Amino acid sequence: MWAVLTVVVVFEFTVGATLSKSINRGCATLIAGALGVGGHHLATTVGERGEAFVLGILVFILAAGATFLRFVPKIKARYDYGMVIFILTFCLVTVSGYRVEELVELAHQRLSTIIIGASTCMIISIFVCPVWAGADLHKLVASNIEKLANYLEGFEGEYFHSLKDKEKSKSLLQGYKSVLNSKAIEESLTNFARWEPGHGGFSLRHPWKQYMKIGVLVRECAYKIETLNTYLNPEIQASLEFKCKIQEPCTKMSSESNKALKAISSSMKTMTNPLAAKSHIENSKTAIEELKVALEVISLEDVELLAIIPVATVAAILEEITFSVEKIYDSVSELSHLAHFKSVEPNVSPEKPPLLHRGIIKPVVDIDNNAPHVEITIQDLCMESPEKARKDTLEILQS
Amino acid sequence: MWAVLTVVVVFEFTVGATLSKSINRGCATLIAGALGVGGHHLATTVGERGEAFVLGILVFILAAGATFLRFVPKIKARYDYGMVIFILTFCLVTVSGYRVEELVELAHQRLSTIIIGASTCMIISIFVCPVWAGADLHKLVASNIEKLANYLEGFEGEYFHSLKDKEKSKSLLQGYKSVLNSKAIEESLTNFARWEPGHGGFSLRHPWKQYMKIGVLVRECAYKIETLNTYLNPEIQASLEFKCKIQEPCTKMSSESNKALKAISSSMKTMTNPLAAKSHIENSKTAIEELKVALEVISLEDVELLAIIPVATVAAILEEITFSVEKIYDSVSELSHLAHFKSVEPNVSPEKPPLLHRGIIKPVVDIDNNAPHVEITIQDLCMESPEKARKDTLEILQS
């Protein structure tokens, strides 16, 4: 019957929680039982009059010590259950007043039933439909990153009206809210994941702590998104003209950050290294430079400062989000390194050499009126991306 | 001995947690015991062959039902412990195979020991050094609001260099971080607070749910502060000239929001209504209008857009924080209304009439060259605040 009771008490939803409870219970019972029997033996040697006194002091010291330890946060998180069982068993053994021989017999019985119950639980939770806390944590972090990516996609559609499907962008904008308060669940899953044996792609010594670090960065990014979200309020009056002028670099920043986050998330899901996100992050950095160039070019005459500030704020927050995404990338890279994720070469076409070296753009100085200009071979240029063409042309003109 | 065990298992840090566990344990044991005895009685009427069968089905249905209920989030939060004890006791009673008369005796014994143990716990936790979850929650929310206020004070000092004491402003800037992740602890305290009897200024039907609503708004404000915090980075190049131009309304916004938050927090601590914060909120709203006026006046020639954007972003986020503070105020007002906080008339001096009506400023139109100007009685003006003087003078000149 004790075995049945152990099963009821110990069984939990995830493997990690069940293991943590079983091991806590087993160890605590063993240690408390041994100490109890030892204490009893000690007390009987003192003689009948001192026995109760010695036992009382022992119970007081150990129970007070264990109760005090329960309030230390680190121990509370991992060994709380074990501490309770320890106090319980120790009191039970010492107070019960059995003779030592009976006690050893009792302890043997109790321990064997607990071992039967706990090992049944462990075997069932591991082999029948296991729910691994570690796998859950991994999925949770990856899906949190994806939620941020979805938000950026939705924001682009909603703010710059690039998405036709209003309903879709609305639904994309909601997901990030749950990321804001994900700390508690991530912490408890990390705690349970530590107890789990290797499973799936996760080894016994998987760097679960790194997930907490990624979680912190993901939440930081989510906080910025929360602030960004207030600027979707249609009541805020913003200059449409100014919005159009910086729309291109801003959409590029947000879409490249979005792609980078999606690449990071999918690399986590497939447990490969996130190198594919690298190029998107580079692109988003170029977009920041482009934004700066665009801002320098804009003439400030006939501009109302009051109307451009909300748009400028959105651009500034998008820039901050881009930096945040890079930090997330670095942190996930570290995880992929620590956990030996499969390395995958990103199949990105190597960057072509500048157009100048391929003769598509030729700098010319006209000797007659001394005006420098460039000659462009239109047919070849059409094969290039317009961005690259403009960038290279600008470079030549500046030099 | 069972009484001692109950004490060990049931005793918790806060009164609410102890009460919740005691009541859960007591009720669960009572119901499970009654059902167990009833089930046993039913099984014995069927006859010896069907007895095991009927008992097996009963255990299966009830244990499965209770286990399933444990996974419902709302029940998990409040009655998880009771459910475990229910399953345990029911199994114990039905499986044990005692005769019904013995069972009633056993149940009576168990129940009385549990009642003794649990009531000892309750009495000790309530009367000897009680730690009330409700009072803790109240203090936590009030101190969170104060932390936001401290941040705003520190930010003002750090960003506009108005505070001389660098160390002090650094320390003020750290507190808000803990607010970001306060959701989990607020939720658990709210859960426990529901179980507590009236204590201190809190009645039995104190609106604990309202604290969760305030908590959400406080966290929203903290997210904005987190974004604001990135702009303290000295690497971000900002135009000093532009900063000076909008410094006054910005400092006013942040210092009035700071004062409003401090007033709200101290009104919560003293359990009075937060009317004192009202005037500060009005002032911060005026500051927003002043900022708009200041922005309209600034000439945009010789201004680099790139250098003013970080400063403008700071101003925009401060504006958002001001709105957030107003929401917090509304929510705390609702709490003070629901919980019947003492009402205190704020001892704010009534606003003086405009300077025009008191003859301190006189509009004059010079007939010779038709130029309107104002005459100001300097001596009287010195008694006024410079802001009010400027505002009234401007009003007259505009009209």
Image (cartoon, coloured by chain):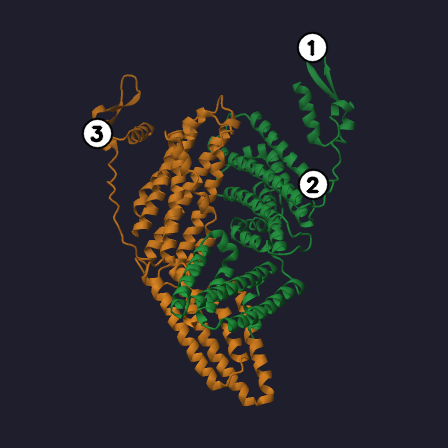
Chain colours: A green, B orange
- Which residue is painted at 73% across and 16% down in the image? A364
Q: Which mark is residue B359?
A: 3
Amino acid type at mark 2: Ala
Tell me which chain the residue with mark 3 is part of: B
- Give the x, y percent position of residue B322: 40, 41
Tell me which chain the residue with mark 2 is part of: A
Q: Which mark is residue A369?
A: 1
In terms of depth relative to the viewer, which is nearer, A290 or B373? A290
Above/below status of B165 relative to A156: above
Task: Count neighbours of disc 2 (C-alpha within 10 A) and say few if under 14, some if 14 to 19, many if 20 or more.
Answer: many
Q: How many angstroms separate mark 3 from mark 2 (CA)?
A: 74 Å
Which residue is under mark 2?
A276
In terms of depth relative to the viewer, which is nearer, A366 or B173? B173
- Which residue is painted at 43% across and 28% down in the image? B243
Q: Which residue lies most toward the top here?
A: A368
Task: Count neighbours of disc 1 (C-alpha within 10 A) and say few if under 14, some if 14 to 19, many if 20 or more.
Answer: few
